[in-house]
Amino acid sequence: MIPPVLHVHHVTVTFNEVEALSDVSFDLAEGEFLAIVGPNGAGKSTLIKVALGLITPQRGHAALFGEDAGRHPERIGYVPQLKTFDRSFPATALELVVSGLRRVWPGRLRPHERDSALRTLEQVGATHLAKRTLSRLSGGELQRAFLARALVRRPSLVLLDEPATGVDFLAEHDLYDLLERYQTETGATVAMITHDLSAARYHATKVAVLNRQLHGFGPPDEVLCEACLKEAYGHLGHAHGVIVL
């Protein structure tokens, strides 16, 4: 029997006696596109860090590909929140992508690293950005460079933490197209944090509605419903998307 790509089992995480996650459990199968939605402070980023093996739960556990989280970082591509990145760092988009191969900032680029990075930049429509410094990239361009960094190893699982933050509507649309194309080509699994409920409805195959607890998990049409959203948000309207019931 093939294990789920991501297995979250009764995960509870506490910071300073406050529960960020409480008894969260779900399985994500190969080839799925998961949208993780919920209000600010719901534990969404904490959940992604548990999956990456960066946070160890006080109770429960997470497994990727049937093994403990953190065992196979080479099989994972990660796109962090861009607002946490210092864009004044003196590096080019090409060097950013190569850092996804080495997992450290490169000094001198090796020919095979340069070739892999350029191919991946081409895949995300960003070859022209290769020599441009990060400080000269727009929000959408920087997002493409980070996506190339995540995909350069051809990962089996792509984790994205609010990837549409700071990008315009067209750049966001392009991002989802690129992810879906990558899934079609590779059969990869995607898990994405988003505040956009409409994006969750139209692009995800599974949705996790989270507010410290899991208030719903399943196909968008089933869990983006009045009961689940009221439990998680306390209301239906949302600044980045309104679900029409």
Image (cartoon, rainbow, N blue to C red):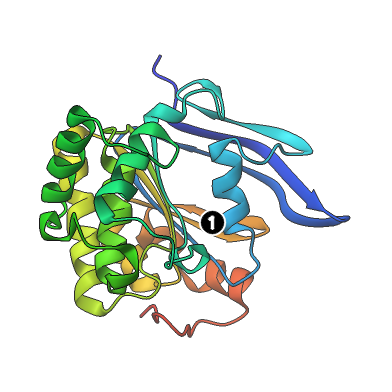
- Whole-percent x, y for residue 219 in the image: 37, 53
Residue visible at 39% across and 77% down in the picture: 243
Locate the C terminus and report the quarter of the image it occupies: bottom left
- Whole-percent x, y for residue 87 in the image: 42, 67
Residue visible at 55% across and 67% down in the picture: 38
Q: Nearer the viewer, residue 29 or 143?
A: 143
Residue 157 appearing in the image: no
To which quarter of the image does residue 233 belong? bottom right
Q: Is residue 101 shown above or below 120?
A: above
Residue visible at 48% across and 69% down in the picture: 83
Q: Amino acid at mark 1?
A: Gly
Q: Secondary structure at mark 1?
A: strand
To which quarter of the image does residue 196 belong? bottom left
Q: Nearer the viewer, residue 130 or 244?
A: 130
Q: Is residue 45 shown above or below 199?
A: above
Q: Nearer the viewer, residue 90 or 55?
A: 90
Determine the residue located farthest toward the front in the rendered image.
108
